[in-house]
């Protein structure tokens, strides 16, 4: 039997460490935000000055959606002042930048049960994540673990129909987010849409490619061109039958996003060419749902 070496790392408390201090930890997270386990995040700012309220440790942003994370670090135990400061910074940022969804994040070495009890009283009204950090040393090497002990209860997303996203252009999507080939897949999808609903065109935003009809934003479908594929996100009611159909066609169904009511489907150029009729049918289904809602609204 092959011998397996089991190491027993020493737990290290950063609050008492002379070198591995809060600034060091800030730099670690800033250089690799994904280490927190919150997804594909990018650094927007560090030591961000707040009006009459000190400095926010780290501001992160989701690379896919209009969502920002206001991150506060506390070495040692969480305390009342840390909670208040975190919520205050979150509140300032959401008021200054209402076009984004915001979430407060507390990172601490020890998150007490009392802290969790207090936070749970208003979590849901204030989207908040608590992450417990643990540092270990093995000989001369250090490693960190980030364990989410309290996840956010999601509030509503900013609807893409609200025309507040930062606009870009086709060049940005062909060279930064995706490629020329994957943006052409978006073009093919648009052709299917316009064959059913004339007047639609693409709107290039920083985080997604949306739709407009005769100049009016109508994001019942949004697209995200990647380096190897394109993702279509279509607003539809969830249906087991529809999911079976998508899978039977051999299409890559990623998931159903409950908050936005969208199916997320990966598409290649071959998928678009092979399944034009099926994609046209789900486009029709999506618009029938929206038109029904609009009719109901007119009756109110």
Image (cartoon, rainbow, N blue to C red):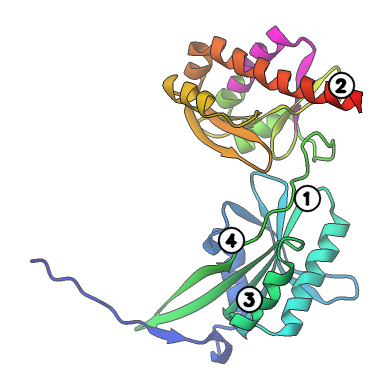
Q: Which residue is mark 2?
A: 215
At mark 3, the secondary structure is: helix
Mark 1 vs mark 3: which is more N-terminal? 1
Residue sticking out furthest to the top: 195
Mark 4 vs mark 2: which is more N-terminal? 4
Q: Is 1 located above or below residue 228 in the figure? A: below
Q: Distance from label 1 to label 3 (Cα)?
A: 26 Å
Q: Distance from label 4 to label 2 (Cα)?
A: 37 Å
Residue 178 location in percent, x, y?
A: 59, 33
Q: Which residue is mark 4?
A: 33
Residue nearer the viewer, 186 or 252: 252
Name the mark nearer the viewer: 4 or 3.
3
Q: Badge 2, how many Cα within 10 Å: few under 14, some, many 20+? A: few
Q: Which residue is mark 1?
A: 100
Residue sticking out furthest to the front: 300
Using residue 50 as the reference point, say whether residue 26 is left or right of it: left
- Mark 2 in CB contact with mark 1 (< 8 angstroms): no
Which residue is found at the position 49% from the left and 23% from the top?
246
The residue segment tinted magenta is 185-204
Name the mark nearer the viewer: 4 or 2.
2
Q: Main secondary structure of the magenta part?
A: helix
Mark 4 vs mark 1: which is more N-terminal? 4
Which residue is found at the position 66% from the left and 36% from the top?
261
Mark 2 vs mark 3: which is more N-terminal? 3
Residue 212 location in percent, x, y?
A: 80, 23
Residue nearer the viewer, 140 or 196: 196
Q: Which residue is mark 3?
A: 116
Residue 259 location in percent, x, y?
A: 67, 43
Mark 2 vs mark 1: which is more N-terminal? 1
């Amino acid at each position: 039997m092959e011998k397996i070496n089991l190491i027993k790392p020493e737990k290290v408390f950063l609050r008492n460490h002379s070198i591995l201090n809060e600034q060091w930890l800030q730099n670690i997270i800033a250089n690799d935000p994904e280490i927190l386990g919150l997804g594909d995040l990018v650094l927007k700012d560090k030591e961000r000055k707040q009006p009459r309220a000190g400095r926010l440790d780290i501001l992160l942003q989701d690379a896919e959606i209009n969502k920002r994370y206001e991150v506060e670090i506390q070495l040692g135990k969480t305390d009342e002042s840390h909670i208040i400061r975190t919520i205050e910074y979150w509140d300032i940022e959401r008021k200054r930048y209402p076009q984004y969804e915001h979430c407060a994040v507390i990172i601490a070495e020890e998150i007490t049960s009392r802290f969790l009890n207090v936070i749970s009283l208003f979590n849901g009204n204030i989207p908040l994540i608590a992450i417990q950090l643990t540092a270990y040393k093995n000989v001369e090497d250090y490693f960190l673990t980030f364990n989410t002990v309290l996840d956010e209860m999601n509030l509503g997303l900013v609807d893409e129909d609200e025309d507040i996203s930062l606009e870009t252009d086709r060049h940005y999507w062909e060279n930064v987010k995706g490629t020329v080939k994957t943006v052409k897949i978006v073009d093919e999808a648009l052709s299917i849409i316009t064959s059913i609903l004339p007047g639609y065109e693409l709107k290039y935003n920083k985080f997604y490619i949306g739709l407009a009809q005769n100049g009016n934003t109508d994001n019942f479908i949004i697209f995200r061109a990647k380096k190897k594929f394109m993702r279509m996100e279509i607003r539809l009611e969830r249906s087991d039958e529809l999911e079976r159909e998508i899978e039977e066609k051999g299409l890559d169904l990623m998931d159903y996003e409950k908050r936005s009511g969208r199916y997320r489907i990966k598409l290649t150029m071959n998928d678009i060419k092979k399944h034009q009729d099926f994609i046209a049918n789900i486009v029709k289904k999506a618009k029938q749902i929206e038109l029904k809602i609009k009719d109901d609204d007119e009756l109110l």
